[in-house]
Structure formats: C-alpha cells, structure tokens
Amino acid sequence: MTAKTASMGRLWSRLWGEVPAEGPDALPVRVHGTEFTRTGAAPVRVKGFDQPLAWVTLGLLMWGLIMVYSASIAMPDNPRFANYTQTHFLVRHVASIGIAFVAALLAFQVPINTWEKMAPWIFVVSLILLIAVLIPFIGKGVNGARRWISLGIMNFQPSELAKLGVLLYASNYMVRKMEVKEKFFTSVAPMGIAVAVVGLLLLAEPDMGAFMVIAVIAMGILFLGGVNARMFFLIAAVLVVAFGLMIALSEWRRERIFAYLDPWSEKHALGKGYQLSHSLIAIGRGEIFGVGLGGSVEKLHWLPEAHTDFLLAVIGEEFGFIGVLVVIGLFMWLTRRIMYIGRQAIAMDRIFAGLLAQGVGIWVGFQSFINMGVNLGALPTKGLTLPLMSYGGSAILLNLVAIAMVLRVDYENRQLMHGGRL
C-alpha cells in the first residue's frame, strides 16, 4: 500500500468517525459492568452522541406539539380567550421549541468541566430570580400564584431554572464533599439548608409541586453520591413530615386531598375535584383506541388547563389506552437511558458528569410520574406539566438544555472510550 493510499484511508476514517483498533494500541471498550477491556476488532463507525435518546426526545416534542394544538384549538370560543386566534398557543409553542433548540445546541457545546465550575453561580442566579418573582411589578401573578417573569416573547418561570440550579449544585457539592460524606453536619446539612431556602421561596409563590421535584432531585443525588443510608432515610423522613405539615396546615391543600379521595361528591365535583373528575371522564371516553386525533370533547372548555397540566388526559381521550401506554413507555425508556449514561460516566470515574446525568433522569422520571399519576387519578392534583410535551416555554427550554447536557456527557464518554481526550 502506498503512503498516499494510507493517508486517504485515514482521512476517510476521520470523516466517517471510524477509529482504528489494532495491535497493542487497541482501544478501551466498556463491556457489561464497570470493567474495561481492549478490542482488536475491525474499525467501526463511532457516533458522536446517543442518537436513540435524541430521536425519542424529538418524537416526544413533536407529539406534544400536535397535542398542544389539538387541546388549545377551541380555546378562542371561550370569552376569556376571545382575542386569541386558533393557532395562538401553537405558534407560541413552536417559538418556545425553536428557542429551546438553540439553547440546547449551545449547551451541548459546553464541556461538562465548565458546567461543574459554573454550578454554584447558576444556583445563585436561580435564587435571585426566585426572589425577584416575588417582587411586585416584576413577578407576574396568575390564578393567585406569582411564578412568572414576563420577557415579552415568553413568560419565564424561575422554578424551572431552580430545578437545574439545584441539580448542578448538588452534583458539584457531592463531588467536593466526597471525603466527608459520612459526617452529617459536615456534608449533608449545608446542602439541606440550601434546598430549604429554595423551598421557602417556592412555597411563597406558592409552588409546592416544583419544591417536591427539587427535593427529590437533591435526595436522589445524595443517595447516588453514596451518603450513609441512615442519614438518607433520616432526611427522607424529615421531608415526608415537612410535606405532611404543609398539607395539614393549609386549608386549600387539605381540600385538594379530600377532593382527590372523592372527586365525584357533590361538594367537590364542581370545586377542587373538577379537573380530576373531567380528566377521568376524558380518559374513560378514549377506551382502548381513542376517539381519534382532534375528536376530544373534554378539551371543549370542560377540562381546564388541557394543553398544560392535563395534556395526558387529552391524549388518553384521542388515542385511548394504547396512546397512554406509548407515552408511559417512552418516558420509561428515556429515564432508563439517561440513568445508564450516568452510570457509564461514574464507571469511568467521572463523578460529577455521572451525577448530573442521573439527576436529569430523576427529574424527568419523577415529574412525568407525578403528572401521569395526577391525570390518571392515582395522585392528588399538583400543577406539574408533562416534560417535553406540555405547553410551557420555560419548561421546554430547561428540559431541552438538561437533555443536551446528558448528550454531552455521553459524547465525552465516547471520546474517552475511544482513546480521545476531553
């Protein structure tokens, strides 16, 4: 073989992402568990990132876009939305997805080491915005809750950034405190105080649902970071008691629990149980195969927030039991895939990257579980959207940025496994 032919072969390999593996310089490849072996197999094409994860994410976004349009198309018939066009929410949702895609592409370009350095600052910015949203003339109130800051093109919800901020901060914190994680007051208590501060600010909005998600993210990272089991269960017990007291001491939260237990009673059917009862009616109407796309009756001003919190109910009515199963299956696969990428990073001694990816898996998995549970009547109404699918600009933005970070973790994993450097 001539030198020119060999040179052209190497160029072709680079263009197609092929990495040669021959002789003593064979590349390290992860097999099954945490062990690494060397391979002498023929060159293979190396993908830059986890393509199935990207395609499933895109599929959920597109399905969500169709369902947001279906669930909101009749809203201008309501006098409250009389000035809106039939495509109002669709256009805004498309714009949100476009902005989120740009932000996700930029986030993917940032190395995980840089995210680790930025983690405390992102957490501080999220705290400042949580305080700002409570200030009159800055925060925007809707239905008695002050959770949004108007940015003109979209309403930004600081609690969504707080989820990412706590996730980054907790992952960074556990890496820094890895040597003292057996000592409660040295390792766990400071992070607990930080999460408590976030919780107090969220409860002032009020947004108990976001606080629950943030608390579970922090707890999950503590557990995955190797905190002593006794400490973990102690913190879990404290949180359970705290959430129980929040419900017991709040009359409208108690009413939600009672309405959840009996949504069909005369007292609750037109009150706190109204959304839940109509969500169950929508899912019941769908039966096995649904009434067909666009055929939902409950979205015609019967089911409030059909395009946000109760999008799954519309999916259940229009696509039936099969449609709901597909959504559940996709989110289960997505969560499992993200957790796998995190485990892979930890196996390569990339602790922050691994905890970051697994934290995103906990976030997406837990929030989708809560939303689905509420729509199916298994959990009390909580006000959490379905990730990647429900209408909501800031939620879509932060969801896609988080997924982009996971894809970056996977990209760097692949680089290291094929002999590259970060």
Image (spheres, rainbow, N blue to C red):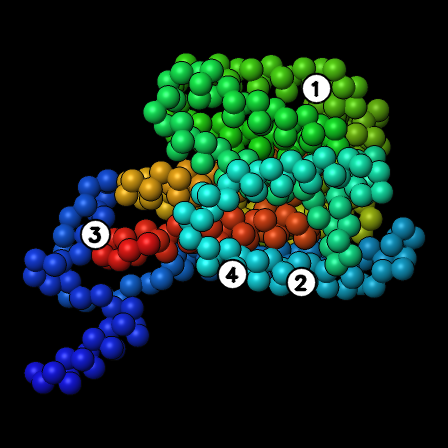
Q: Distance between the residues labelled 4 and 3?
A: 28 Å
User: Looking at numbered disc 3 in the image, what kind of residue is underneath it?
Assistant: Val
Q: Do the residues labelled 1 and 2 touch (CB within 8 Å)?
A: no
| Mark in front: 2 vs 4 | 4
Instruction: Identify the residue position indicated by label 2 in the image.
Output: 94
Q: Are marks 2 and 4 in contact (CB under 8 Å)?
A: no
Instruction: Identify the residue position indicated by label 1 in the image.
Output: 247
| Mark in front: 1 vs 3 | 3
| Mark in front: 3 vs 2 | 3
Q: Is label 4 in a helix, a strand or a loop?
A: helix
| Mark in front: 1 vs 4 | 4
Of mark 1 and mark 4, the one earlier in the sequence is 4
Q: Do the residues labelled 1 and 3 touch (CB within 8 Å)?
A: no
Q: Which residue is drawn at 82% across and 55% down?
A: 75
**On-image quarter of the N terminus:** bottom left
- Above or below: residue 391 compared with residue 159: below
